[in-house]
Amino acid sequence: MMWELGDLLIFGSIMIVTWFLFIYNWPRLILYIYKRAILGKGFGDGPIPVNTLQTEPQTLFADPIHPPASASNLATTGVNRDTLLTVGWLDLRKGPLSLHIPEMNGRYYSVQFTNPSNNTVFAYVGRRTTGTTAGDYLITGPNRKGEVPSGMRQISSPNNSVLVIGRVLVESDSDLPAAHHLAEQIQLTPLNQEGSI
Amino acid sequence: MSARTYSYLTVLIGVVIGFFFIYSFIFNPSARTVRNDVIQSFLVGFGLAFITLQILGRIKATKVNGWTTMFRCGEPSIGFLSRAACALTFPGPINLPQEAMYWTTDLDGAGHVLSGAHNYVMHFPAEQLPPNDAFWSLTMGFDNNRFVPNPINRYSVSDRSGLVPNADGSVDIYLQNVAPAGHESNWLPAPAGKFILWLRVYQPGPAILSGEYRVPPVMETRAQ
């Protein structure tokens, strides 16, 4: 054998570290593509600024065969004809954000909060978890101290970066405008000074 | 070429290339330098990680009647190997199982690649539509995961699409390129070539979450 112990150690350790880093960071790499798609291109009406939510246009849902050329590839890949998507990328280092949900009247909807460092879901707002009545939620980062304004429920994120995916059910073609109107009202605003106590 | 032959060929080519790589570089004393060690170990680690991902994607998947799904994706408590497997099978911000379950397939119940060259039926026995507290849907896509144009602009069938049950309460969904005469309401138009299917169940019932519910196979209809 021509292997020296030193060779083996170098070879083996680099091999194992590379292996581990790749497997461990695979979910993060996938969601980085989503970050680029959201902040770079969006649904075709231009980039979606950080800390804002945008709903896919009615035209994209109604005619998925002819998406706008300006839309991100991700927005037009994946076959989903059930829900309108509302997406956004959050950066909570600048302070907490307030999430408004309109009255959904029993309609299926969910707002999913994903930790993009490992693609795990740490919270939901939606029909299954919080019901379909209107509400306001405070999304806070890991270092947030201070109280939650009255009337708001807190969603604490383990990470300052958050990927938000909202889904609102479209019952039928004729229901699309109504569903879109509701989805558009799922909105984020920075918590103002008065509210921050 | 069937999907199985294709996987075997891929593995075979990988083994042959891997053997020559190791034989000519790693066991060749004149090529051994620290610089080569670093580069090669990095490449080998990368290659092993890629192979590990493919293996994980297979062993962590739950296969039922040709359909592939995964349980526990998105849960913070699962380990990094399961997270990697989920991100390979469902590359995106996937829902927790209790919010929505997804199944996908590019194979029929007999293991053959789905193609519009054939006609298929998916048969849900009476009371065996996917149990849920929200909705379910079956969506058609090209094998690149894009929508299939068709004359009636129907891209999915679901609990909202007006499926007509049979006399015994069962439901047949017709997956074919040309409209099935007399069954247009239960037709999910397929392209002429290869296609994939997505079954989604939102707020799935306990029978789904326990693994008890079995998604029926997509069966090729033989010519009479």
Image: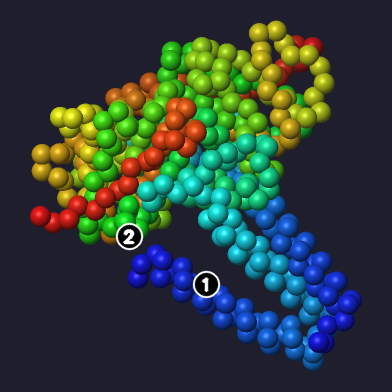
Q: Is residue B215 visible?
A: yes
Q: Are marks 1 and 2 in contact (CB under 8 Å)?
A: no
**Which chain does the numbered disc 2 sit on?**
B
Compute the Cα span from label 1 to label 2.
Answer: 20 Å
Q: Residue B45 location, x and y as percent? A: 71, 67
The one nearer the camera, B175 or A191, is B175
- Residue, disc 2: B112
Residue A150: assigned label: none
Q: Quadrant of residue A83?
A: top left
Amino acid on which the number 2 mark rests in the picture: His
Residue drawn at 22 percent across, 39 percent down? B172
Q: Is residue B37 above or below residue A136?
A: below
Residue at which label 1 appears:
B11
Quadrant that contains the N terminus of chain A: bottom right
Picture coordinates of residue B123, whole percent (x, y): 26, 41
What residue is rendered at 66% in x and 41% in y? B78
Query: What percent of the width, then of the height, locates residue A189?
Result: 64, 22
Number of residues whose C-alpha sits closer than 10 Å to that of mark 2, classed few (under 14), some (14–19) or many (20 or more): some
Is label 1 on the same chain as label 2? Answer: yes
